[in-house]
Amino acid sequence: MRIYSDADREFLDREYDARLLSAGFDKAAIYQRESARVLGTIERIPDIVYDPTSGETLDLYPAAKGGPLFVWIHGGYWRSSNKTENAFVAPAFLKAGVSVASIDYTLAPAVSLDEIVRQVRASIAWLYTNAAAYGFDGRRIHIGGHSAGGQLVGMLLADGWRQSFGLPEGVFGAALSVSGLHDLHPLVHNFVNEPLSLDHASASRNSPLEHLPARSTAHLIGTCGGLESSEFKRQTRDYVDAWKARGFGGEEIAMPGFHHFDIILELEKSESPLFARTIQRIREYTN
């Protein structure tokens, strides 16, 4: 883990401003267009309240009864985007017989990152408890997220919370982190922190690199676009390396030619290496 300070602000602002390396890619417009295109073609159960405390909701896209579930967590630096904008992720998984849940969480600065982590954990507990009612196998839950969503995937894999939420330890199979943020200390010193108000203590509490589990049945898939900054690449590499060093199953998938925002559009394509590897790991998993 690299150590930064306020003196590194200019460097860190540049490294974590993904727009600088995405050639004017209008992610909101493109994600919304792609999601609108698919929403009329697939079954969706929208706005299911998974957490009465916050009132936060998820959308469920059901596939064949009794099949696995893939839970998708959107990015947006914990301050933007939403589940509906990410609906384009669902169709390829549905065609492969995998149900999809897309999660919303309260955005910063309305709540802290600690609370966002709690909400996403609550979503998994709700899905596990209600699996039979919605026709998927709660023993086969797989998780994925992009950017900030990758950090939330990492915090789902961490120890110390499942028992209090009524979950078994081996609840996760495949775990996909796309351009994920696993070491939050650099963000304390750059523009990303403005709505988050992280200090190093809260960054430590919410950095997956500092909360690797003692044991895990999950297989981690980490990836980052070849056109992304050195810091985003480091974030993926360090987390995958640390995960594998524990003796857990894990791999890093190279995605040359992609930047921070177009890489997740590859999950729309059943022939893409990113989707193909993810679905292979889902199919291989047995609990």
Image (cartoon, rainbow, N blue to C red):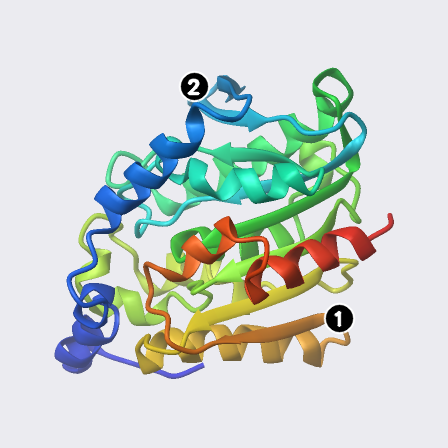
- Alpha-carbon neighbours of circle 1 within 10 Å: few (<14), some, or many (≥20)? some
Residue at (81% x, 29% y) in the render: 66
Circle 1 SS class: loop
- Residue 221: x, y in percent? 61, 65
Residue 248, disc = 1
Question: Pointer 2: what residue?
Answer: 55
Circle 2: residue type: Gly
Please identify the quarter of the rendering in which residue 220 is found: bottom right
153 with respect to 197 (left or right): right
- Residue 180: x, y in percent? 45, 63
Q: Between marks 2 and 1, how big is the CA–CA gap?
A: 35 Å
Please identify the quarter of the rendering in which residue 92 is found: top right
Residue at (58% x, 66% y) in the render: 273
Please identify the quarter of the rendering in which residue 249 is found: bottom right
Circle 1: residue type: Phe
* Residue 259 in the image: above or below residue 67: below
- Residue 18: x, y in percent? 25, 66
Residue at (60% x, 80% y) in the render: 241
274 with respect to 229 (left or right): right
Instruction: Locate the N terminus by quadrant.
Output: bottom left
